[in-house]
Amino acid sequence: MSIDTLRKRYQSAGQEHLFTFWSQLSKGEQASLVEQLEALDIERVNRIYTKAVASESGTLSPTSLSATIEPLPKGASESLGNPAKDQEWRKIGLDAIAHGQVGVLLMAGGQGTRLGSSAPKGCYDIGLSSHKSLFQYQAERIVRLQQVAEAEAKKPAGSVIIPWYVMTSGPTRQATENFFTSHHYFGLDPKNVIIFEQGTLPCLAHDGSVLLETPSRVAVAPDGNGGLYAATRSPISPSDKSHTVLSDLAKRKILYVHAYCVDNCLVRVADPVFLGYSIQKQVDCGTKVVPKAYPAESVGVVAYRDSKFSVVEYSEITKEQAERRDPETGELSFRAGNIVNHFYTTAFLNNVESFEEQLAFHIAHKKIPYVDLKTKEIVKPTKPNGMKLEMFVFDVFPFTERFAVLEVARREEFSPLKNAPGTGSDDPETSRRDLLAQHKRFLENAGATVKEGVEIEISPLVSYAGEGLESFRGRIFTKSGYVESVEELDVLA
């Protein structure tokens, strides 16, 4: 595209100010700016801005301000706890895994900034004896689950593969790839770990004009975890435009995908029970939830908005709604806490593009450094001066035809890492505490006794969810330690 054509395009879009410093740029800087502007769908950016502003102001549709928010209807969700059902779902899920029908999609674009680290959050060590990172724990759960599926289906070792699609962001991709390489992919075959990158959108002033970070570079930010859907359609590598996550899923004949966030140390990666539940229900999309801890907990809930499944933010429901209880059970009516743990069919993921334009992006008002167009000075604002546009992964829920919710126990499946060490909640110490408490329950559920104060860390390579420990029934564990094999547990008893 010629520079004149490009300028006219941006002029028509009302964004010609991006060429303000053109005549002052070096040839290299001009080439860099042109590359960025050619890659940018500026007309789409304008549409997203218009829709996001309308959505934020409540003018997107006549019903926006009067949306009816209701608890999930009876029968829309089920809970774990019925041994026969749980086992049936597990068998269905393991069968799908054994037949190579399951892939895993990890959202890992965030940095550990709040944890005092600039590294990707998945690299973080929560203080376990093993010093394993979140990435390693999750990788080893995949390794173990492949082995469990092989054993149950009587398949040869190494024949079951669960491909792992790791979504990074611009700032974390290289560091993530380096971390996986230096740790030899934690025992997984590198060709089955596909690292890709979520997209970005320009940062905007409040009037919708695109901000310049430098005279030759547009200010951009990741497009939120909902950018996952567009990212699955984008080339994994610039060297092969045809190779995308969706094409890779198709090539491998993957039918079902489990998606989750990196910061949950208890996540059951490719959980066969959740997979089996969703497959049996024949849903396009499903989600795991945990019961809200208390009415005012700052967590979004899965609910009905205008008779469609949605995640309703805690700020969107009234105090009366938050405190309302089911007269039959006494439980909170709005109790289904969202933990960003989802099931999709690959058919649904392929269909998202058909309705994506109907989704409204969310506006995050931020302090965004920018170049003053008159003085050419870099301005670092002290209060929000612009907006970043984000889509959330749950924004697709209202567009599903068949949807199901599975409620799981918080202590078994959800312990997020959000806050700095020493905060007292959702921090490295609570993550460590919750994981070790689960490992203690694994042993106790197998019939063993763990003495008070004894901490035993059980490698995911030993047990995915408590299985394989039956031989320790009646044993008493008196020593703390970390075990990488069943045999090593003998030393601690």
Image (spheres, rainbow, N blue to C red):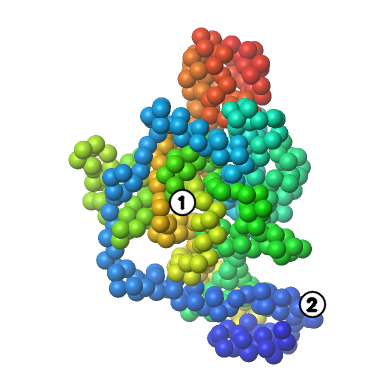
On the image, the x and y values in percent for residue 289 come to 41, 43
- The type of residue carrying mark 2 is Gly
Q: Secondary structure at mark 1?
A: strand
Q: Quadrant of residue 217?
A: bottom right
Neighbours of disc 2 within 10 Å: few (<14), some (14-19), many (20+): few
Q: Quadrant of residue 248?
A: bottom right
Q: Is residue 188 above or below residue 394?
A: above
Residue 285: image tag: 1
Q: Residue at x 70, y 63 (%)?
A: 242
Q: Is residue 77 above or below residue 197?
A: above
Q: Secondary structure at mark 2?
A: helix
Q: Residue at x 55, y 53 (%)?
A: 346
Q: Which residue is mark 2?
A: 28
Q: Is residue 3 above or below residue 363?
A: below
The C terminus: image quadrant: top right
Q: Nearer the viewer, mark 2 or mark 1?
A: 1
On the image, the x and y values in percent for residue 314 come to 35, 53
Q: Does residue 215 appear left or right of residue 288 in this picture?
A: right
